[in-house]
Image (cartoon, rainbow, N blue to C red):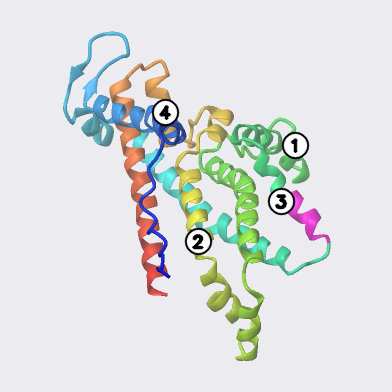
């Protein structure tokens, strides 16, 4: 009796229908990404070397926009400083506090569902709405904070004082950011294998050692997501400061300067594009550096 062997499965050929479906599923998202994201980004890079008011002719000026931005545009460096402060505040204060809340809720404290809902509630609000709420709380005209402090006769100008308003806005933005970070870390903590904690306890590790040496390293994928989100939230902040005083008097940010020059009365699209390119480089540089460090750490573990 002759033995028969199954024929080796050959490479599957895509039918015309498969190619159409694949082209639609991949082509539309890629086309939208190029049109909405990378198209304007590349256009901004090109326009940053020109002088254009949006109506007349486009004139090539080379690197003059960048030179004027650094040397002859007073709001630029305060905006850079404020963006750096925003990033440090969210990264070093708001994000660790969100992790702390996630750890507390993960331990199953009483009313944990209630706390989880309360802390997550601000996430559904836009930063513009958070800015309006901040005005109600921090305003000098019957503001809730001045009322609680008993400063009706001589209220503190939390939003008008350039030495205070940036800190108040960062706290208000953190109110929203903390809830988002808490939910992400809470999901990560739920996926940690309990056997790892039990093994650490058997080896004599305390709760702090178990968290920093066992639990936190397993949260590396969540750390990457949270880190990228934190950088994006810090550098794209616009709504909250624009809702308060249009991003002026101590609340200057790079995103506000872009809007003022491109859409505002100035009509300097080339100059505004140069600011947008600076923000793009800072954003990509921060995110890529963070991702590279995290990936290197993951390979080393």
Disc 1 to disc 3, C-alpha distance: 30 Å
| Occupied quadrant, residue 275 | top left
Q: Earlier in the sequence, mark 4 or mark 2?
A: 4
Q: Earlier in the sequence, mark 4 or mark 3?
A: 4
Write down the residue under mark 3.
119
Provide the residue span drawn in magenta: 111-118
Disc 4 to disc 3, C-alpha distance: 33 Å
Disc 4 to disc 2, C-alpha distance: 28 Å
Q: Secondary structure at mark 4?
A: helix
Say whether residue 93 is magenta: no
Say whether residue 114 is magenta: yes
Q: Is residue 162 above or below residue 204?
A: above
Q: How dense is the environment of label 3, judged by Cα within 10 Å: few (below 14), some, or many (20 and up)?
A: some
Q: Is residue 271 above or below residue 287?
A: above
Write down the residue under mark 2.
221
| Occupied quadrant, residue 13 | top left
Residue at the location (16% across, 27% down)?
62
Name the residue nearer the viewer: 207 or 5: 5
Write down the residue under mark 1.
152
Q: Is residue 122 above or below residue 290?
A: above
């Amino acid at each position: 009796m002759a033995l028969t062997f199954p024929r080796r499965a050959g490479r599957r050929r895509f039918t015309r229908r498969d190619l159409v479906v694949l082209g639609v599923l991949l082509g539309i998202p890629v086309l939208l990404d190029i049109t909405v994201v990378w198209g304007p980004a590349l256009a901004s890079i090109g326009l940053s070397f020109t002088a254009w008011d949006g109506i007349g002719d486009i004139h090539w000026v080379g690197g003059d926009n960048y030179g004027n931005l650094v040397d002859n545009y007073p709001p630029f460096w305060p905006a850079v400083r404020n963006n750096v402060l925003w990033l440090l505040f969210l990264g070093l204060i708001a994000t660790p506090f969100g992790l702390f809340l996630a750890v507390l809720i993960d331990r199953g404290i009483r009313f944990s569902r209630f706390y989880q809902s309360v802390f997550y509630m601000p996430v559904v609000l836009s930063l513009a709405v958070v800015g309006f709420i901040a005005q109600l709380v921090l305003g000098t005209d019957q503001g809730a904070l001045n009322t609680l402090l008993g400063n009706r006769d001589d209220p503190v100008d939390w939003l008008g004082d350039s030495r205070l308003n940036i800190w108040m806005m960062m706290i208000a933005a953190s109110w929203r950011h903390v809830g988002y970070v808490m939910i992400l870390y809470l999901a990560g903590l739920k996926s940690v294998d309990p056997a790892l904690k039990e093994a650490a306890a058997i080896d004599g590790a305390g709760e702090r050692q178990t968290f920093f040496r066992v639990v936190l390293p397993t949260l590396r994928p969540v750390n990457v997501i949270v880190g990228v989100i934190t950088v994006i939230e810090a550098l794209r902040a616009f709504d909250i400061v624009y809702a308060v005083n249009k991003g002026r008097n101590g609340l200057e940010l790079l995103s506000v300067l872009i809007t003022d020059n491109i859409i505002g009365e100035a009509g300097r699209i080339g100059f505004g594009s140069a600011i947008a390119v600076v923000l793009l480089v800072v954003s990509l540089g921060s995110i890529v550096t963070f991702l590279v460090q995290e990936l290197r750490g993951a390979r080393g573990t």
